[in-house]
Image: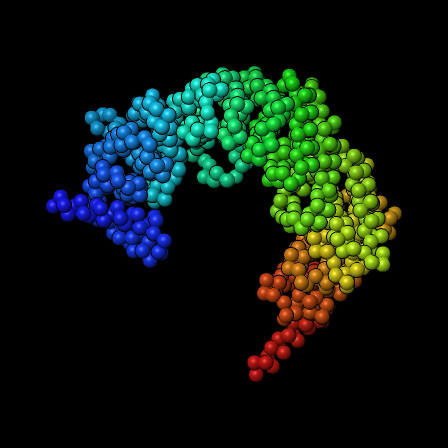
Amino acid sequence: EKMAEEQEVRQLELLCKQLYEATDPSLRVQAEKALVVFQNASDTLSKCQLLLDRGDSCYAQLLAATTLTKLISRSAQSLSLQQRVDIRNYVLNYLATRPKLPNFVIQALVTLFSRISKLGWFDSDKEEYVFRNVITDVTKFLQGSVEHCMIGVQLLSHLTCEMNQISEADANRSLTKHRKIASSFRDTQLFEIFRLSCSLLRTASENCKSLNFSDESQHGLMTQLLRLAYNCLTFDFIGTSTDESSDDLCTVQIPTSWRPAFLDYSTLKLFFDLYHSLPNSLSPLALSCLVQIASVRRSLFSNTERAKFLTHLVNGVKHILQNPQGLSDPSNYHEFCRLLARLKSNYQLGELVMVDNYPEAIQLIAKFTVESLQMWQFAPNSVHYLLSLWQRMVASVPYVKATEPHLLETYTPEVTNAYITSRLECVAVVVRESLEDPLDDLGMIQQQLEQLSVIGRCEYQKTCTLLVQLFDQAARVYQELMVSSAPIQLDINIQEGRLTWLVYIIGSAIGGRVSFNSNDEHDAMDGELVCRVLQLMNLTDSRLSQGGCEKLELAMLSFFEQFRKIYVGDQVQKNSKVYRRMSEVLGLIDESMVLSVFIRKIITNLKYWGRSEQIISKTLQLLNDLSVGYSCVRKLVKLEEVQFMLNNHTSEHFPFLGNGVAVSEMRCRSMFYTSLGRLLMVDLGEDEDRFDSFMLPLTASFESLGRLLM
């Protein structure tokens, strides 16, 4: 009997080795099949214990741990309470006596411990909850060697994650049970675990000089400790955040019982100190913890407490900016940008300006933002956070009641200027070195332009002056290239790239106009910008028969979209200064003439850009948006250009209606005909002749189809 069992266990060890090490795929598949059979057998439990007891093969230990985890997860009831308590104690004992196991085995055993503890959280024996004495059991590890300590921290860290995570099994079982367990863990253990992590980090921080971070185990322990603190701070305290990926859930719902840890400045100071004293491989984790601490719900503090907390926070940020060497590491830089964004998402501008060192801090933040924007190749994904800080600050200006100055009129133009000039400077580098073009990432551009539309409206005169100057310069060079006898294509590409950025940015500047804050001067400046884009459009449209620049056309459409939202349609004052400037420069004296510019552009795009699905679909979206407004659609119908479209919707005029186009482009037709239908119906009444003539092209198509089917 015993021999046969030993034989079987040896066979299992061999199968594990084959599964993880065999180079022959068929061997691996066979091994996997045999192990699945083993996992579903009735005597699995005793075999797993034998595999662990022998401890001959790390792969077999991994198999045993994962099999037990599956067994427990399948249904806790399949094992008796005593069996589960035994497994838990066995795992703790196993880890205590073999602290030098390979990492992946430790991880698997830690997962097993967490899963047993979570699923048995409410199981009791003689009035005592048997799976809850976590801290007592783990403390024994924390008093041992570095390896033991690391396992102890991992046990707490993984348990915190496990409590927070809704596994598939939980979702199938019951979400209320999962929340009940998570809430009980939060109320009985989590704060103690967080305090423990802080006290261990404090000890490490005080002994930082004597720690050797190139030693794997010391570095590993520090990583685990920071992760533990981070897992406590990102715990889903009130059961709301199902999606961790969105960074806009800016409030951390810390329970009221945790107040002491945050009123006491030493917690905040600890993580700032750790950032400064740890190597770059560890410091980003300290910053991640700070991002969470900075986002503690406002209601945890009284007003004076919050002001004090914010002062410490701003001083910590200022100190990092005065000693910026760590920020050259991309992970540090990214987390620090997130931290800056939280300063405004969680505190009001009125509170920030009252901080003692605010003038110095805002100056340093502005300098950091400007330098970041100028280094456009370094960490482009972090720019979003910096722009979001400035956008939120500028948007709050009208509401600030504080007596202290916010100084935004001094620093915001520097940020606007840096964004605009750095985008233009990047073009030549991207074109010459064939780098990935930021202009291809339309999602990112849209996001940044929305932020810039608010930022640029602060000291708008300066924004417009800069845009006019840069636009005139780029347009002049572009025109010279167009008329020169042998222009170099590279130079043309560079100028088109610069103009593309400028057209996007002008669109966003106009889109930033808000009714309560606008004035005639600003509208007149908008007029200057609009005229320039329309003049450029006349130039590029006249050359479309020789080919055009797709990126520039997409920017034009983005500009038209913003211009339509603000200055065309039912809500707009027609006496706006924008129209005055347009009639002086371009002879467009009223809204109908401006609408005809829109429609001519739409017809031009549909005629020349059939090969670009992006341009066609965005052009049709513009037509669709124009045809929805009540007064707008009535003006449109009176235009010759619209009548032309209603009477000539054939592939001869609009190539995307032909048969030779891709299916994805054919999809655009429904939007085209929806808009045409609206325009046709406005004042159709009982006019059957007009309806018939509109249907002529479609009738002809059906008749030719009919002939083919005869």
Give 124 or 150, whichever is nearer the viewer: 150
- Say whether residue 182 is visible: no
Colour convention of the picture: rainbow
Q: Quadrant of residue 171?
A: top left
At x 42%, y 24%, the residue is: 197
Residue found farthest to the right:
584
Q: In which quarter of the image is the C terminus?
A: bottom right
Q: Report x, y in % for residue 495.
A: 77, 49
Depicted 648 relative to depicted 450: above or below: below
- Say whether residue 621 is visible: yes
Give 481 or 390, whichever is nearer the viewer: 481
Q: Is residue 105 left or right of residue 284?
A: left
At x 45%, y 21%, the residue is: 204
Residue found farthest to the left:
1
Depicted 53 relative to depicted 598: above or below: above
Q: Report x, y in % for residue 550.
A: 70, 56
Q: Report x, y in % for residue 671.
A: 63, 60
At x 31%, y 23%, the residue is: 140
At x 66%, y 76%, the residue is: 700
Depicted 575 relative to depicted 480: above or below: above
Q: Report x, y in % for residue 439.
A: 67, 48
Give 353 or 543, whichever is nearer the viewer: 543
